[in-house]
């Protein structure tokens, strides 16, 4: 189940990343996950994007492993169960991970306690990611549903 | 001086351009940024006041009466506008900044730095963005002290320092700064003041370094360098394309409907582009342009379109936009219908460019022998068709002599490439070339009037025939060509300026490119004194910062058409080079 979940995680992350890019092209959101992740480590856009993609794929696998552990623990897997986990994951990503935790760890993003010693330059996500476009939360949630369903499907094969 | 505007519009000559190799902004003499497309030159505008007096802009100027003086910082595309008022004077430095590797910088950034020079001056500013002529709604709101406007994949933020919330005062030695930042498909980057002001200086240093490397020491060096800088502004760096102009629908006649979108790359300009860039030592830019040209034509070969998008694409569909147009000149068009026309004169410059690139580098670069052969085959079989010609007439296609001459050039050049082993020869190329030359010299030569005809059997003088010498069909001192050039000057000349064809004076201004083409032709024919005198007058007809629009009213000197116009600046450089050395690099 774990191996299946990891395989699903790889494919699911590819779908999630591509879907996210598509949502940007369609004007649904300006959230650029690789850029947001990569600029934690470097201010140079090219390197940041490359690093960001690598981190995003690694994250996708780590979460897939977590999904796999849940499948093992409950001894059940399938696309529907994966979809439910994806829903929880999507809410966590949109409501906490990107919304709260990312600005906390991001050296180029301002928080309420950022003071005169810092000069944040990157637009924070805002309440429920709304700064990046009103459809951002919806797109993020929907893509995580697909991600979860794919992991569940592969884990059940 | 205030009240520079007529019905809300500045004279077109009152605009200067700034840019970053991806897009250009037009800054008015009264301190208003009235045109800017983001993120790229062919994107939707966020400032569009050149086409709608009530449209979008970024205003910044003293609040009372003022006099204005402006210049580009020497050798750069950084604009300095000095406003003098009764209370004192300030200088606004306008620049678009470049990609910053040392800090996280916005995708696009336009910066306006105001320095107090003396006295104490009250200034006002206003940020009035509008996306895609208002067709995409922008929500402008204040967020953490910034003005932010967003719609879908695009967001704009205006940061200001020491500039109040729309009005402020500045004394000697004080500074205020505004920065417009743009994000496309990504979060906004909201820069610090230090970074913004540093990037302005870095942009200035880049431009100065770039222009320092230009290899031209002849007459009119300042005008040539300014033209090179204007061309560099028009170059879309991600692809190498050079757009004809960064604007759409600035009219060829006030109140008229000859308003076209020039935010594309035209293939026929390539031959002038390559010559100018190589003469100035801009080898990298020449290679990039050639690469774009070959990459673009690959999508449609063996037929080529007259124009392509900056990324080589063919999304050129024309539509009309519901805005008034410059001083009521409507319609305002987005996209260009001419992309779908058959313009046979495009092939000659394209293959002449390839030939010159081969002679310069010994390689075909991005061109492939199979594709060049297909182009030549197309010309050999289709040259007898009527076409829309270089002036992109929207009337019935005709048999333009220049189009046939450029077909000859295309076939001659590909045959020469075969001579040099660059591709396999096909005998039908030379046969067709000979046939074309016979047609031109028999049908295209108007014996009664002693000149080449625009179209056989029609009494029309056409300044584009000057390109016959500039584009390798004939030597400039050829008897027939010289007679044609004299006819063009006599029939179409108004002072130093030329209209482009008979009757053009009733529908548009004089076509500045043709005037410089005449200089070029005279210089190549060894008539350097005439060429120099004409060049002096034409150089003096630029605006106060050395830029040209497509056309000029020969009586009033008023600019008409899109600006700054790449083809005019190319023609200026090439004319100066021809006077300097007289020879066309073989």
Image (cartoon, grey):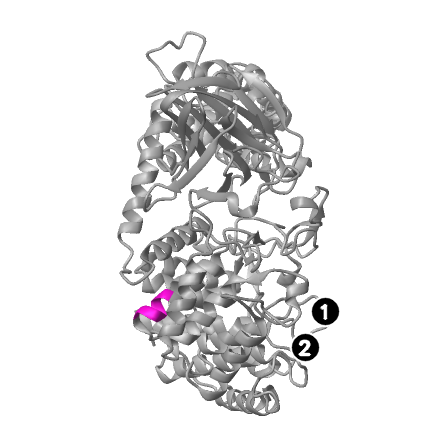
Which residue is at a point 40% across and 26% down the rendered structure image?
B89
Q: Position of residue A36 (x, y in %)?
A: 44, 27
Classify 10 Å Cα crowding around label 1: few (below 14), some (14-19), many (20 and above).
few
At 52% from the left and 24% from the top, the residue drawn is: B64
Q: Is residue B169 left or right of residue B151?
A: left
Residue drawn where x is 32% and y is 64% of the image: B279
Residue identified by numbered label 2: B398
Question: The disc numbered 2 marks a residue on which chain?
Answer: B
B579 is within the stretch colored magenta: yes
**Residue sticking out furthest to the top:** A113
Percent x, y of residue B142: 56, 17
Which residue is label 1 attached to?
B395
Label count reads 2
How far is disc 1 from disc 2 in space, using C-alphas? 9 Å
Q: Position of residue A87 (x, y in %)?
A: 61, 20
Which residues fall within the magenta stretch?
A: B576-580
Q: Is residue B355 above or below residue B426?
A: above
């Amino acid at each position: 189940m774990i191996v299946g979940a990891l395989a699903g995680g790889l494919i699911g992350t590819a779908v999630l990343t591509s879907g996210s890019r598509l949502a940007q092209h369609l004007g649904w959101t300006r959230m650029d996950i690789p850029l947001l992740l990569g600029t934690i480590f470097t201010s140079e856009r090219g390197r940041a994007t490359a690093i960001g993609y690598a981190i995003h794929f690694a994250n996708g696998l780590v979460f897939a492993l977590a999904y796999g552990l849940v499948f093992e623990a409950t001894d059940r897997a399938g696309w529907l169960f994966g979809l439910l986990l994806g829903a929880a994951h999507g809410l966590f990503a949109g409501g906490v991970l990107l919304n709260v935790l990312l600005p906390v760890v991001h050296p180029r993003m301002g928080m309420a306690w950022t003071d005169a010693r810092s000069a944040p330059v990157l637009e924070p996500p805002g309440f429920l990611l709304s700064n990046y476009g009103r459809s951002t939360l919806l797109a993020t949630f929907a893509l995580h549903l697909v991600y979860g369903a794919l992991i569940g499907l592969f884990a059940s094969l | 001086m205030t009240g520079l505007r007529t019905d809300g519009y500045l004279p077109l000559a009152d605009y200067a351009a700034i840019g970053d190799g991806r897009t250009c902004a037009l800054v008015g003499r009264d301190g208003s940024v009235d045109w800017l497309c983001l993120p790229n030159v062919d994107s939707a505008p966020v400032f569009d006041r050149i086409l709608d007096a009530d449209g979008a802009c970024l205003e910044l100027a003293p609040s009372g009466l003022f006099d204005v003086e402006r210049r580009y910082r020497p050798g750069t595309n950084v604009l300095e506008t000095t406003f003098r008022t009764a209370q004192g004077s300030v200088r606004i430095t306008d620049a678009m900044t470049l990609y910053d590797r040392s800090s996280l910088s916005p995708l696009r950034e336009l910066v306006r730095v105001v320095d107090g020079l003396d006295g104490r001056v009250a200034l006002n500013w206003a940020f009035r963005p509008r996306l895609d002529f208002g067709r995409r709604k922008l929500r402008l709101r204040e967020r953490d002290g910034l003005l932010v406007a967003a719609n879908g994949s695009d967001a704009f933020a205006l940061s200001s320092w020491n500039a109040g919330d729309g009005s402020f005062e500045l004394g000697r030695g004080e500074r205020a700064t505004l920065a417009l930042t743009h994000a496309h498909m990504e979060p906004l980057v909201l820069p610090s003041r230090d970074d913004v002001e540093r990037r302005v200086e870095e942009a200035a240093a880049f431009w100065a370094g770039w222009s320092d490397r230009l290899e031209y020491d002849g007459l009119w060096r300042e005008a040539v360098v300014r033209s090179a800088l204007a061309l560099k502004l028009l170059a879309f760096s991600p692809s190498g394309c050079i757009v004809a102009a960064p604007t759409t629908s600035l009219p060829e006649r006030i109140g008229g409907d000859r308003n076209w979108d020039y935010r594309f790359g035209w293939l026929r300009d390539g031959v002038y582009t390559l010559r100018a860039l190589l003469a100035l030592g801009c080898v990298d830019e020449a290679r990039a342009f050639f690469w774009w040209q070959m990459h673009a034509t690959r999508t449609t070969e063996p037929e080529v379109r007259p124009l392509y998008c900056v990324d080589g694409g063919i999304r050129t569909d024309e539509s009309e936009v519901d805005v008034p147009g410059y001083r009521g000149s409507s319609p305002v068009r987005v996209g260009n219908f001419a992309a779908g026309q058959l313009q046979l004169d495009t092939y000659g410059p394209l293959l002449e460019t390839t030939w010159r690139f081969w002679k310069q580098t010994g390689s075909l670069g991005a061109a492939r022998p199979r594709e060049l052969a297909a182009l030549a085959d197309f010309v050999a079989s289709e040259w007898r068709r009527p076409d829309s010609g270089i002036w992109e007439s929207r009337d019935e296609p005709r048999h333009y002599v220049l189009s046939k001459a450029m077909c000859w050039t295309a076939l001659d050049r590909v045959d020469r490439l075969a001579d040099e082993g660059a591709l396999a020869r096909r005998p039908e190329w030379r046969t067709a070339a000979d046939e074309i030359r016979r047609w031109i010299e028999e049908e295209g030569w108007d014996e009664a009037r002693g000149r080449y005809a625009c179209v056989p059997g029609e009494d029309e003088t056409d300044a584009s025939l000057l390109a016959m010498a500039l584009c390798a069909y004939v030597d400039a001192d050829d008897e027939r060509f010289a007679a044609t050039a004299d006819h063009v000057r006599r029939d179409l000349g108004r002072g130093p300026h030329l209209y482009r064809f008979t009757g053009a004076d009733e529908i548009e201004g004089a076509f500045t490119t043709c005037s410089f083409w005449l200089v070029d032709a005279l210089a190549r024919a060894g008539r350097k004194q005439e060429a120099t005198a004409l060049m002096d007058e034409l150089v003096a007809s630029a605006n106060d910062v050395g830029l040209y629009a497509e056309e000029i009213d020969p009586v009033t000197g008023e600019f008409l058409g899109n600006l700054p116009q790449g083809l005019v600046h190319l023609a200026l450089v090439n004319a100066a080079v021809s006077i300097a050395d007289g020879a066309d690099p073989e």
